[in-house]
Image (cartoon, rainbow, N blue to C red):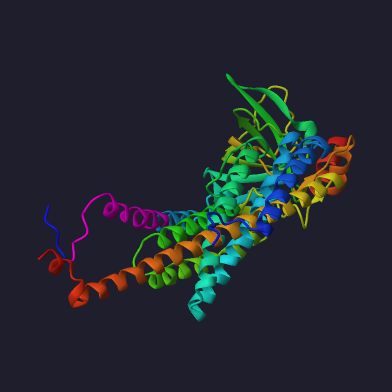
């Protein structure tokens, strides 16, 4: 039997190759083809990373919420594993969103961060809640109880997603952050095109990463489960009169 | 060491102490979320648009508050107030103008027609900044020490950007009209 020591497949290899090609295209488009902004100059190029990261953060955390609900309702281990995988990638994207937004904010808003800004702070709360989700997952204890606790945090975090997304509309007087660039913005054609390329590339990366992370988590579960089975067999074997090491030594 | 079949108590050590780390992170996260929500509920950034700030001037008194308005391009003046180098300008919102004296470096993208968010308070009297002609000239000015630019979601590359901005923004229209006068 062939030994498999990786989580790759034909699909993930194709996705991985597409991500590499897409990233090269995105860098070329972002740096050399998309025009600089009259006002922000080169700082505008940050949206090619910032906006896709933000949108895929939403998608990742919605996936976590769906997986969490499926665990709570149906006790689906498959969905629980999907939820955990999506949360890890979502945290990565959310961190990237906060970082790129902050770097963009300095030359544009004249500040890296504003603690009173609703969009910024609700995004940070979302980020911290999902770190909390991952912390709860690694607390240990019975797997079922851990999954349930994490699922509750996952659903609670998803509940604030609409607030994060709509904050720039609902609290216009409490946010420096502009309204949606993609739906309400006025973008140059090449800026919009590059932004869409960024969304696609980030999406491909999301699916590539979630497939690998899911498979790793699934294999970890299998190992833990087989370890438990083996331990049970060994303990039962020890209970057999002729198999006792103590008796053997005597 | 003697071999034994009796169940062993897990050894206290790294593995055990590590289980506290996620618990500690989880508690830290809960505390951070509560603090941040409280911070939001107290409305730390809530800003008054220029027209609201003028309407509520008596209630605001000399309290520190945040003001938003669109700078009138032709009013922007670098000058001095006493011994201090300042930037003086007039902002407008909802057809109401406010004279501003800003201490410290203006934001990189500070320019006429692009809204700014300022931290400071009302001061009764004339700005008295050399070279500055206050457009509001109502016996009050806003003394600011922190400036942020409230950028919109337009990403434009155009030689006639200023014209397009003026066309697309109501406040830009007002500012342009003031300067034309």
Q: Is residue B2 visible?
A: yes
Q: Residue furthest bottom?
A: A74
Lateral position of residue A48 relative to residue A152, left or right: right
Q: Which quadrant of the figure contains the C terminus of chain B?
A: top right
Q: Residue furthest left?
A: A250
Residue B43, percent from left and from top: 53, 54
Return the residue nearer the eye: A82 or A45.
A82
Looking at the rendering, which quadrant does residue A114 occupy? top right
Is residue B41 depicted above or below B88 in this figure?
A: below
Return the residue nearer the eye: B69 or A10.
A10
Residue at horizontal 64 percent and vertical 56 percent from the top: A208
Q: Residue furthest top?
A: B83
Residue A207 covered by magenta stretch: no
Residue at horizontal 57 percent and vertical 55 percent from the top: A89
State the extent of the magenta-drawn residues as a range.
B7-29
SS assignment for the magenta stretch, majority? helix
Q: How many marks?
A: 0
Looking at the rendering, which quadrant does residue A132 occupy? bottom left
Return the residue nearer the eye: A201 or A78.
A78
Residue B70, percent from left and from top: 73, 42
Lateral position of residue B169 relative to residue A61, left or right: right
Q: Is residue B95 visible?
A: no
Is residue B141 depicted above or below A184 in this figure?
A: above
Residue A84, percent from left and from top: 51, 63
Residue at horizontal 62 percent and vertical 38 percent from the top: A103
Residue B20 covered by magenta stretch: yes
Residue A93, percent from left and from top: 60, 51
Looking at the rendering, which quadrant does residue A209 occupy? bottom right
Is residue B85 depicted above or below A112 in this figure?
A: above
């Amino acid at each position: 039997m062939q030994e498999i020591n990786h989580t790759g497949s034909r699909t993930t290899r194709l996705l991985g190759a597409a991500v590499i090609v897409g990233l090269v295209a995105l860098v070329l488009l972002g740096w050399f083809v998309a025009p600089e902004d009259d006002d922000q100059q080169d700082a505008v190029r940050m949206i090619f990373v910032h906006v896709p990261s933000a949108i895929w953060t939403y998608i990742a955390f919605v996936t976590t919420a769906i997986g969490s609900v499926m665990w709570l309702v149906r006790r689906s281990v498959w969905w629980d594993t999907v939820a955990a995988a999506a949360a890890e990638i979502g945290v990565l994207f959310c961190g990237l969103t906060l970082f790129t937004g902050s770097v963009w904010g300095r030359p544009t808003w004249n500040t890296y961060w504003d603690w009173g800004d609703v969009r910024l702070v609700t995004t940070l709360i979302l980020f911290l809640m999902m770190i909390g989700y991952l912390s709860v997952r690694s607390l240990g204890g019975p797997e079922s109880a851990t999954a349930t606790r994490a699922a509750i945090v996952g659903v609670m975090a998803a509940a604030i997603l609409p607030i994060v997304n709509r904050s720039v509309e609902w609290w216009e007087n409490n946010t420096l952050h502009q309204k949606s660039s993609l739906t309400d913005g006025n973008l140059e054609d090449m800026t919009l095109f590059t932004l869409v390329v960024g969304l696609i590339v980030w999406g491909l990366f999301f699916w590539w990463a979630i497939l690998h992370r899911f498979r790793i988590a699934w294999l970890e579960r299998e190992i833990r489960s087989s370890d438990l089975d083996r331990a049970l067999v060994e303990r039962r074997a020890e209970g057999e009169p002729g198999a006792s090491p103590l008796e053997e030594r005597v | 060491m003697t071999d034994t079949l009796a169940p062993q108590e897990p050894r206290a050590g790294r593995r055990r102490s590590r289980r506290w780390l996620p618990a500690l992170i989880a508690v830290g996260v809960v505390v951070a979320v509560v603090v941040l929500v409280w911070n939001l509920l107290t409305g730390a950034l809530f800003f008054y648009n220029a027209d609201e700030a003028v309407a509520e001037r008596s209630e605001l008194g000399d309290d520190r508050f945040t003001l938003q308005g669109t700078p009138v391009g032709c009013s922007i003046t670098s000058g001095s107030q006493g011994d201090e180098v300042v930037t003086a300008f007039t902002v407008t919102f909802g057809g109401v103008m406010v004279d501003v004296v800003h201490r410290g470096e203006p934001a990189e993208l500070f320019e006429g027609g692009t809204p700014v968010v300022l931290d400071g308070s009302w001061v009764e009297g004339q700005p008295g900044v050399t070279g500055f002609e206050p457009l509001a000239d109502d016996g009050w000015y806003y003394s600011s020490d922190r400036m942020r630019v409230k950028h919109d979601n337009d990403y434009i590359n155009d030689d006639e950007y200023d014209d397009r901005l003026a066309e697309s923004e109501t406040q830009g229209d007002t500012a342009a009209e003031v300067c034309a006068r």
